[in-house]
Amino acid sequence: MICNLCPRNCGAERNEYDGRGVCRAGTLPKVARIAPHMWEEPCISGERGSGTVFFSGCTLRCVYCQNYEISAKNRGRIITVNELADEFKRLENLGVHNINLVSPTPYIYAVLKALEIYKPSIPVVYNTSGYEKVETLRLLDGAADIYLPDFKYASPTLSEQYSAAKNYVESAVPAIEEMLRQTGTPEFGGDGMLKRGTVIRHLVLPNHTRNSIDVLDIINERFQGAMVSLMGQYVPLGKASNYEKLNRKITQREYEKVKNHLFELNLDGFVQELSSADEKYVPAWDY
């Protein structure tokens, strides 16, 4: 396979077991954890958890990634498409609220085949960095019920510095617009769980409240119908200690500044507690 699935347009050669692209993924799914997950937004995790599949490898290279062991170091185990479909069924039988695919884009063809083999009766969540191509997302039209994209940056300078992706903003904006086109306005079940819709996540970085405020302004201007999840869980993991401005948690003052702007814009969604900024919330990569 010659791969151009993400905005990097690597043109990288990939076989079943490995690849030469930025994500270094092969075409068979490589997973680090498949289990109920309780730490997503309330309308995703609920009381029984989100049936989360953490894929290894990522199209983005964030130096501060909270899942650095799997996103950059590609820790995980390769499984077949049939095994992935079996895992969807196993998770559903555990009673989870949804099937939550985390960083699945390198394996999108395998994911779609697995969903053909077994289509869960619960929503499918596509959980992504936001660094996507519209053409790739269109393959998911009708397969993904909920999109959970990050919108990390308003500045190409920051996206290049921290994620090696100068074109992040110009890629993420049309990508999220496509997600909204597919899902429409949020739909909830009688239990308060999200059945269909798009929730845009933004992680506040230390020393970069201006970026966060600008991100919220873009969301307000461009993404009508989406909910927003503002996250304060930042912990300096990955290679963050090599960057002076990233080498600490965010302060209460920084977070309040961004939250106040969120409230001024009257954006619908969720605000995370700063107590979430703890390494204990990083899952065990024990699949």
Image (cartoon, helix red, strand yellow):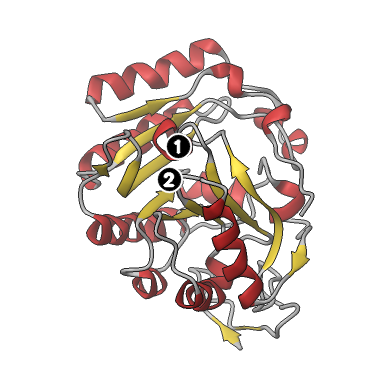
Q: Which residue is mark 2?
A: 151
Instruction: For marks 1 and 2, give the CA distance.
Output: 5 Å
Say what amino acid the circle numbered 2 marks: Phe
| Dot 2 crowding, Cα within 10 Å, few <14, some 14–19, many 20+ | many
Numbered disc 1: secondary structure? strand
110 to 43, vertically: above or below: below
Q: Residue at x 68, y 76 (%)?
A: 80
Nearer to us in this view, 91 or 70: 91
Q: Place residue 284 in its image quadrant.
A: top right
Query: Relative to 143, is 6 on the left or the right?
Result: right
x%, y% of residue 151? Answer: 43, 45
In the rendered view, tell whether residue 27 sits above or below residue 151: below
At x 26%, y 56%, the residue is 183
63 relative to 92 in the view: left or right? right
Q: Residue 207 appears at what percent x and percent y?
A: 56, 25
Quarter of the picture holding the C terminus: bottom right
Q: Quadrant of the N terminus?
A: bottom right
Quickly name the residue at label 1: 202
Residue 42 screen position, x and y as percent: 43, 31
